[in-house]
């Protein structure tokens, strides 16, 4: 929020005051994904990855959850907290990766590989989760696949995370889906080479949703949480970060002595940036947009999530 004048700051203060009144009035918790805008992260009760946030919401006694993230994340919160009101402040904050496979696509794939176990990345719809044996996140995908007794494993929807898992668990036959995160996919090897030229003594930390040629060259590969933990604990002081720019907010705030450089200027997810302080105010005021799921889908999706939690 640099380059702001007095009027802007006054407006922000008004929004913050409104949020603080409304969150008490509605007995709400506000949670934010690490890819959200900095100012949205700053008003949240917890900032984290999608699973961590959903589990926090389930354990909280709040009646209302304002989930600042994208649609599948708020859905995961609803799967784990059916009795709570889960609100997504921006209705159109979707995830193009999650939208790259439908439940019907997955049923057809299962028909073609009848003996395969089905693993779905958490970046998927509740319907796709309901068709899967087990979910995974980017931090536990390798362990989830290792835990399966089947040799053949359908892995949806992210082909980059799936390839990373296939390399890490060579004994399995991983059947990939052609999905990808457009934001991570935008970063190319040339961007990494350029960033390394500019910052030769920086460590490269990347998310497994990046292209395999980037993942291969990284010093560390992990989820958003793993990247944040690694950089915070490391004795190193310079890092090239290969994931959505939102993580820089907490990295720079909590590690004042360290320097962080974005691997590519393309690491901006437009869906994650849809939610603003104004959207949070409107969400709380009008109790929108409510996430609802058919109970049959929810319970099946819950089974896949619970199986994952048993493994990790
Ligand atoms: O599960 C999440 O929150 C996502 C989408 C990424 C990550 O690595 O945390």
Image (cartoon, rainbow, N blue to C red):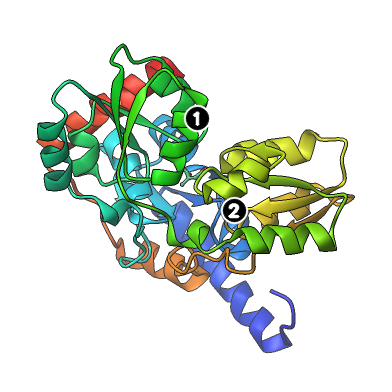
Whichever of callouts 1 and 2 sits on the residue coming sooner in the sequence is 1
Q: Which residue is more in the foreground, 154 or 50?
A: 154
Q: Circle 1 is placed at which residue position?
A: 167
Q: Position of residue 235 (x, y in %)?
A: 88, 35
On-image quarter of the N terminus = bottom right
- Position of 128 with respect to 175 (left or right) is left
Where 40 falls versus 105 (above or below)?
Answer: below
Determine which residue is flagged by label 2: 243
Q: Nearer the viewer, residue 293 or 66?
A: 293
Mark 2 sits near ligand 1, with its Cβ under 8 Å away: yes
Asked if marks 1 and 2 touch (Cβ < 8 Å), the reply is no
Residue 129 in picture, x, y percent from top left: 24, 37
**As displayed, is residue 82 above or below residue 204?**
above
Mark 1 lies on a secondary structure that is: helix
Residue 263 visible here: no
Q: Nearer the viewer, residue 180 or 40?
A: 180
Residue 241 left/right relative to 80 = right
Image height of 6 relative to 311, above or below: below
For the point 12% across and 38% down, the residue is 107
Q: Secondary structure at mark 2?
A: loop
Counting from the top left corner in percent of width and height, residue 22 is at 45, 60
Q: In the image, which is nearer the foreground, mark 1 or mark 2? A: 1
Badge 1 crowding class, 10 Å Cα cut-off, few under 14, some 14 to 19, many 20 or more, is: few
**Residue lying at 32% horizontally and 51% vertically, measured from the top left:** 98
- How far apart, in angstroms, are the residues tagged by discs 1 and 2? 20 Å
Q: In terms of depth relative to the viewer, which is nearer, 84 or 184?
A: 184
Res 132 → quadrant: top left
């Amino acid at each position: 929020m640099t380059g702001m004048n007095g009027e802007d700051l006054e407006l922000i203060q008004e929004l913050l005051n409104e949020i603080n009144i409304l969150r008490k009035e509605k007995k709400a918790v506000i949670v934010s994904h690490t890819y959200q805008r900095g100012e949205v992260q700053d008003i949240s009760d917890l900032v984290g990855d999608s699973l961590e946030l959903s589990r926090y919401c389930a354990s909280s006694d709040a009646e209302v959850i304002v989930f600042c993230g994208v649609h599948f994340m708020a859905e995961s919160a609803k799967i784990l907290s059916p009795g709570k009101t889960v609100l997504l402040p921006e209705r159109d904050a979707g995830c193009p990766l999650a939208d790259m496979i439908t439940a019907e696509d997955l049923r057809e794939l299962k028909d073609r590989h009848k003996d395969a176990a089905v693993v779905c990345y958490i970046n998927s719809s509740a319907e796709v989760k309901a068709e899967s044996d087990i979910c995974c996140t980017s931090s536990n995908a390798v362990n989830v696949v290792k835990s399966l007794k089947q040799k053949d494993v359908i892995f949806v929807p992210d082909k980059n995370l799936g390839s990373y898992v296939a390399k890490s668990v060579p004994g399995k036959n991983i059947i990939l889906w052609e999905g990808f995160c457009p934001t991570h996919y935008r970063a190319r090897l040339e961007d990494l080479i350029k960033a390394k030229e500019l910052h030769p003594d920086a460590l490269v930390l990347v998310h497994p949703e990046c292209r395999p040629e980037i993942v291969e060259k990284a010093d560390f590969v992990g989820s958003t949480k793993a990247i944040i933990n690694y950089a915070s604990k490391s004795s190193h002081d310079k890092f090239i970060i290969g994931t959505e720019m939102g993580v820089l907010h907490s990295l720079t705030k909590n590690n004042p002595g360290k320097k962080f450089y974005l691997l590519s200027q393309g690491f901006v997810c437009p869906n994650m940036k849809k939610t603003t302080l104004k959207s949070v105010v409107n969400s709380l005021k009008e109790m929108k947009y409510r996430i609802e799921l058919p109970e049959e889908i929810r319970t099946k999706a819950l089974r896949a999530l619970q199986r994952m939690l048993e493994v990790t």
